[in-house]
């Protein structure tokens, strides 16, 4: 009977996690899109060069992309910023063009910075998982990483409902 059959982690498993390359850890955490897209983008990000191309999905979808990539806190901050800018515009009776300009600037910023934001998010999460889950490291990487289509679709449906209710 192996250690896995008893649901007891192998004493060698946690030490083996430290031998995985950072690349392997990122691939496990992100999933299939790592090799196809993110690996090349992440390699272009250095301390001196923080931009790694324009991320069209992040530009168009903004908080929906953030929720899809399981960056819920960043998505909530994005939404709060959009609502705050709308409130400021209406409270001070500013032209609607200013609110649109803020939204466009936020979208462009998101498109330009999405790959960098995601890289640092991934690295931080992997570090936390490595420190807190040495015995089931691989499973937690896959579980906590990847994507959440349900969160993205839920947010999209919520936006549609809110837009419908405001009309």
Image (cartoon, grey):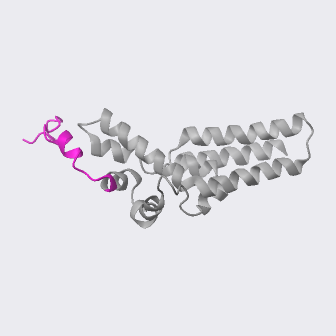
Give the total of numbered labels.
0
Q: Position of residue 152 (x, y in %)?
A: 57, 49
Where is 45 relative to 71, above or below? below
Q: Position of residue 92 (x, y in %)?
A: 90, 35
| Residue at screen point 53% across, 61% down | 52
| Residue at screen point 73% across, 42% down | 82
| Residue at screen point 63% across, 47% down | 63
| Residue at screen point 76% across, 36% down | 84
Using the rendered image of the protein, determine whether residue 149 is visible from the camera's viewpoint.
Answer: no
Say if the magenta span includes residue 156. no
Left or right: 149 as drawn, with respect to 62: left
Using the rendered image of the protein, determine whether residue 44 is visible from the camera's viewpoint.
Answer: yes
Where is 91 relative to 102, above or below? above
Residue farthest bottom in this picture: 36
Residue farthest left in this picture: 1
Region of the chain picked out in magenta, as a range? 1-23
Q: Position of residue 59 (x, y in %)?
A: 65, 57
Residue farthest front in this picture: 48
Left or right: 47 as drawn, with respect to 87: left
Please state, as top left, top right, bottom left or bottom right, where the N terminus lies in the image.
top left
Left or right: 152 as drawn, with respect to 108: left
- Which is more toward the observer, 162 or 56? 56
Q: Quadrant of residue 111?
A: bottom right
Q: Position of residue 54 (x, y in %)?
A: 60, 63
- Which is more toward the observer, 70 or 152? 70
**What is the magenta segment's predominant secondary structure?**
loop
- Which is more toward the observer, 105 or 76? 105
């Amino acid at each position: 009977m192996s250690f896995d059959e008893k649901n007891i982690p192998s004493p060698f498993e946690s030490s083996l996690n430290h031998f995985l390359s950072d690349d392997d850890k990122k691939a496990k955490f992100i999933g299939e899109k790592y090799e196809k897209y993110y690996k090349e983008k992440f390699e272009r990000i250095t301390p001196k060069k923080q931009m790694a191309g324009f991320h069209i999905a992040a530009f168009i979808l903004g908080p929906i992309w953030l929720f899809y990539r399981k960056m819920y806190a960043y998505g909530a901050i994005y939404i709060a910023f959009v609502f705050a800018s709308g409130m400021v515009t209406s409270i001070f009776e500013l032209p609607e063009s200013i609110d649109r300009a803020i939204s466009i600037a936020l979208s462009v910023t998101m498109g330009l910075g999405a790959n960098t934001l995601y890289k640092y998010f991934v690295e931080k999460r992997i570090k936390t998982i490595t420190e807190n889950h040495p015995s089931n490291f691989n499973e937690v990487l896959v579980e906590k990483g990847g994507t959440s289509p349900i969160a993205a679709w839920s947010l999209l449906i919520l936006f549609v409902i809110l837009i419908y209710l405001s009309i």
